[in-house]
Structure formats: C-alpha cells, structure tokens
Image (tube, coloured by chain):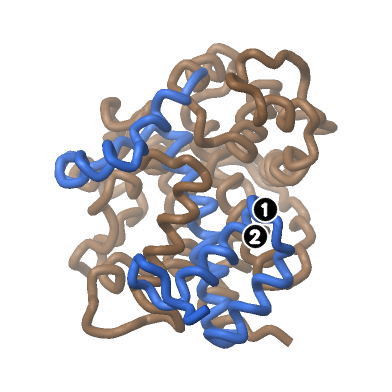
Chain colours: A blue, B brown
Amino acid sequence: MDGTSDVGVDHATLLGAFAESALATAAEPLGASRARLMEAIGEAGMIDAAAVIAGFNGITRIADATGIPLEVPKAEQTAGLRADIGIDRFLEAKSW
Amino acid sequence: MTNVRSDMTQAQADAWRWIGHSGTWWTGAERIGIAAETRRAATCALCAARRTALSPAAVAGTHDTSSSLLPAAVEAVHRIRMDSGRLGIGWYEHLQAGGLSDAHYVELLSIVAIVVAVDTFRAASGLPMLSLPVPVAGEPSRRRPAGAKPGLAWMPTLAPEDRSPEDPDLYRDSPGPRERGGGNVHHALSLVPQSMIHWWDMFETMYLPAPAMRDFSREYRAISHAQIEFLAARVAAINQCVY
C-alpha cells in the first residue's frame, strides 16, 4: 500500500480507515487503525486527524438537527455531483 | 504519553468546564444531565432498535434513562446522538409540542455536540474519557436575541446584520474582518449566542478557523487542507449529513 488513493489525497486509505474505526463503522479495531496511521504520518498527524473526525462528528449533528440548508451557490455548483453519487437520497430518509 | 496541541487542549477544557455552568436556558445541573444523557444514549436499547429500523417511527418504546429531564429533551438528546442523519422538521415540531422550546433545544444541541466531539476525540486519540464536570450553582440568563428571525433553519436564527450591541460577538466581528458567518452552519446555533460561541471556539481548534480554511498558501495543521477535507467528507457521509 503506498498510502495514496485514487482521490489524490496522501494516506487517504489510512485516514478513511481511521475515521471509520473512530465512528465504530469498521471491523478493524480503533487501536489498530490508529497505530497504522501513526506509523505513516506521526503522532501529531494522527492527533489532528482525530480532531477533525471528532469535530465533524459534532458539527454534522448541529447541521442535521437544525435543518440548516446548503448555501444556494454550493447547491448549484454540486447539483450534478450530488445526483451522481446519490447523496440527495439521504433527504428521503428523513422521517420525523 | 500523547501530545495534544495546547490550543485544542485548552479549548476542549474550557468547553467541558462550561457544561457545568448555568447557560442561557438550562441550569448547570440540567446541562450536566444533558451531557450524561448523551453518553447514556450510546447503550439505549430503543435507540439501537430504531437505528436499524427502516423508519425510526416504526419502533415504539421508551429510552433507557435515569435523568429528570423532560421526556422531549431525552428524546432530543438520544436521537441527535444516535440517528442524526434521519432527523426531520416533523420530529422537531413534535419535541416543541412536548414542551421543549426552540431555545432550550438549541442549547441542548450544543451540549450534545460538545460531548460527542470531545468523547470522539479522546477515544480516537487513545486518551481516557473525561469525567463530567461538577455543576456550578446559578440561574440561566434567559436572554433571547431580539433580532432572531425565522426562515433559514427549523428555528429562528440571528444573522450577523441583525445582531444588536446587547448581543455577544458571536460572529467574531471584532476586531474585524468578520471571521464567522460565511456558511449557513455558522448560523445554526445563533438563537443562543453563548452556545454558538462555546461550540465554535472549540471546533475551530479541532478543524480550522475560517480564514485558515481558505488560506491555501500554507498548512496550519500536521495534516494538509486536502487531508482535512477528505476526513470531513468521510465523517459527513458516514453520518448521512446532507449539509
């Protein structure tokens, strides 16, 4: 593994695995994904990755629990992308 | 020993300590109750059943709780903690009908978000969980910003241009130029300015302040802008966040 994924972000595979473990959506234990990431980018990098994961685990709740809409320019710029990857279907899952 | 940036350590400590103090609408003891309920939701049997159901509305029952919070507040904490990607305005209006005011809800949400963020950070970093702070006696200030208006979100929000001199500097207008307010999410907690300030003061040390987010001439963290945004997008997708 060279640590680079096809999205062009360094160590994306390791970062993604760390995020999934931290949010308990991966089979890999958190300690193992943390160790692999630290080996690749060091402790300071792991800490900053943990901070971003944790911060967004909070702010996604703020966004979804207030009904804040995407800004109009962003919505217009990403309309095709959102349709392609099916993200608009998340809205259909909103219930009560 | 794990070394954590001092600015983030301080910001998280401040946010954590603030949970124990009276807020704008809840007392310190009630705010600790909300924080404790946030942790309890992770092992709630009803939440687990709802999370795997096609529709959470299809699963009846009561939450595992030992708090004295209003049932609508318990429901709010548990759903926000465990199934935030499927919240809708009908659910929010149901909470209001159950006696949870819009401002109480916003302050509650800020506490849930802080507890989720701090607990997630410490677990991810391999650090022990923090004990909840001891409540500090005092009365909530109960001050609602006069300029808050409906329209953007489920609840009224206070836009930067509607802020009065009596309102705190929630968008960081001073010393200028304004550092917050460029995205709709900045407005989300603005009905309770102190809650908004406490969240964003902590969050910006974990992510990036807005000026740094847009400055690609240098890196501000031990990971790059691209790596930060990759992680943010991954978390948003996992949580099914539509923002």
Q: Position of residue B151 (x, y in %)?
A: 26, 26
> Is residue B43 something one can see in this rendering?
yes
Circle 2 residue: A21
Can you say whether B14 is above or below B140 in the image?
below
Name the residue: 41% across, 55% down. B233
Name the residue: 41% across, 35% down. B144
Residue A27, image quadrant: bottom right
> Is residue B115 something one can see in this rendering?
no
Circle 1 residue: A24
Mark 2, secondary structure of its residue = helix
Type of residue at label 1? Ala
Type of residue at label 2? Ser
Mark 1, secondary structure of its residue = loop
Residue B56, image quadrant: top right
Q: Residue furthest front?
A: A1
Q: Is residue B152 left or right of residue B37?
A: left
The chain that hosts pointer 1 is A
Name the residue: 66% across, 41% down. B27
Other-residue count near label 2 (Cα within 10 Å), few / some / many at <14 / 14–19 / ≥20: many
Instruction: Choose between B63 and B85: the one closer to the eye.
Output: B85
Name the residue: 76% across, 26% down. B46
Q: Are marks 1 and 2 in contact (CB under 8 Å)?
A: yes
CA separation in Å, label 1 and label 2? 5 Å
Q: Position of residue B121 (x, y in %)?
A: 62, 65
Q: Position of residue B30 (x, y in %)?
A: 70, 39
Q: Is residue B145 left or right of residue B99?
A: left
